[in-house]
Image (spheres, rainbow, N blue to C red):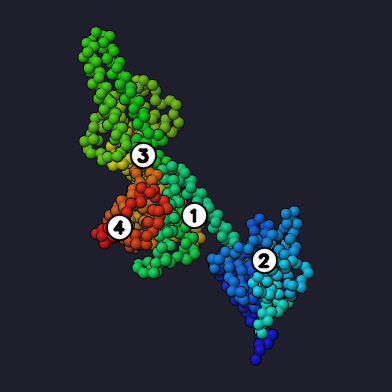
Amino acid sequence: MAASPDDTRERRYQRLIELGIALSAERNYNRLLEAILLGAKELTNADGGTLYLVSEDRRSLTFEILRNDTLGTAMGGTTGIPISIPPVPLYDADGNPNRKNVSAHAAISATPINIVDAYDDEHFDFTGTTAFDVRMGYRSKSFLTVPLKNHEDEVIGVLQLINAIDSDNNVVPFSEEVMPLVVALASQAAMTLDNQMLLDAQKRLLLAFIQLLAGAIDAKSPYTGGHCRRVPHLTEMLAKAAEESQTGPFADFALTDDGWYELEVAAGLHDCGKVTTPEYVVDKATKLETIYNRIHEIRMRFEVVKRDAEIAYLTGVLAGGDPDSLAAERDARLRQLDEDFAFVAECNVGGEFMAPEKIERVKKIAETTWVRTIDDTIGLAWEEKARKMAHVVPAPAVEHILQDKAEHIIAHSKPPIGPDNPWGFKIPVPEQKFNLGEIYNLGISRGTLTAEDRFHINDHIVQTIIMLESLPLPRNLRRVPEIAGGHHEKMDGSGYPKGLKREEMSIPARMMAIADIFEALTARDRPYKPAKKLSEALKIMSFMVKDRHIDPDLFEFFLTSGVYRHYAELYLMPEQLDEVDISNYLPKAAE
């Protein structure tokens, strides 16, 4: 028994409601576009259809989704098959509206158009459709073209349905009864699509701001250029590989669309706190470096002392002293000063371990004195002058060739993080200062950073968390501070700033820790170390696994998935790409 017209109408209304609910719940852009077209095809029992969107310049309609059941055609959307058909122009070269094309006319007039038979229609140009039919062996007959209008009554797209099919599988016109349903669906679709487009635009804007900030951080330091781009890429490569894995500890790992967006935001902002870190600390290539390398200032003091030796020799000769003995004394003094400065300069580079005897020699050299005859409190900015005036020594003054002065201690400009901080940071408070003392810096045992410098380097992650926690993040981004702020934590709880253990960290946060370390080890733009070869970097990381600093499962997956190699081929120099036998670095091999 055939369904009555009332039953059919009721089913259509019910289906329209269901489609509206489904559209409002869909958050994937491509699936949303498909749902709009497929829902309209279902309501009208249409054989085919096309969904167009108005271009950003509002000069054309671009093909987004194309379906035809008889021809078995499915293009655009989630199919991944691009639609090569050129856009439909809304205006000609002179700016006149395109009234010949039915979809263009529907968009321009903002009215639905129902055509019984395209071949008999005298209002629109269907020559292209006729040529398509001849080529494909198809017969395009009935057309229903409906504009999609948003809440501002602006047309944002066009829905076009082709060939309504009746119960006997015959092509029939689209009934006047079904038109209001399609218009209602188009209206609901337009609202949902417009909201989705606005959300996508907001996401793109936020990601663009993140890229802008990351680019500014990298540009701020020529030695870390690209870090804020490479770490997110490597993190996402690792997450993608984990999501695709079918076996092992990450077989169940999966991220939703929101999860991927959250990871992208967190990875892009993982070092945003570096905007608060002084460049000379981030880029500190020598021990005496601040805004400039202070070895030049010390060299000038040695030059002054050498001139004093020359003056002492000439004064002695003029006073009747023995020229030969005075010259020998002068030459010995000059040789000693040259050797002392060469030693200080070598210590400044920070390339070798500073044994205690070397530090003692620095202190011994510092006992050399020279006479300053000019007031050193003039020509200063008020802040520096305020520091000096508390310990002013008027000229002329005898000063040491190397000094640790009270004015070298500079207070931290950011508010201190005390033991009762609300974030649970565990970075020590006493080091919240700068210490520019010359002897103190030259005595750094390894590298170029003092304990205070390391505090400021580490402090960038504290500032990152504070900055991100201060943002009114929506629910789908609530884990951004945890993911971005955890890449310096260690699996045994000895990391910073919170001393988290492995089980207290999310998998994305642990992934970012792997990415941050590997990028740092292999980067070729650091002033304080050469870029390591692939095998060297993996060997160091295998020791870090043994010391329970990085996640053993993730590191093993990092190796076995080949992510390390893929990244290396993208970003490392050819000379860094040595042969690697990953079995030497797997966690079991490292034990």
Within 10 angstroms of label 4, few (less than 14), some, or many (20 or more) residues? few
Q: Nearer the viewer, residue 134 or 448?
A: 134
Mark 1 and mark 3 lie on one chain; the one further toward the N terminus is 3
Mark 3 and mark 4 lie on one chain; the one further toward the N terminus is 3
Which mark is on residue 285? 3
Which mark is on residue 158? 2
Q: In the rendering, at what x and y percent does residue 226 appear?
A: 44, 48
Q: Residue at the spot x=43%, y=58% of the render? A: 236
Amino acid tagged 2: Val
Amino acid tagged 3: Ala
Question: Viewer-nearest of labels 2 and 4?
Answer: 4
- 214 in relation to 478, above or below: above
- 331 in relation to 174, above or below: above
Q: Residue at the spot x=32%, y=57% of the render? A: 550
**Residue sticking out furthest to the bottom:** 1
- The reply to whether dot 3 and dot 2 touch (C-beta < 8 Å) is no
Q: In the rendering, at what x and y percent does residue 547 appear?
A: 27, 56
Question: Viewer-nearest of labels 2 and 1?
Answer: 2
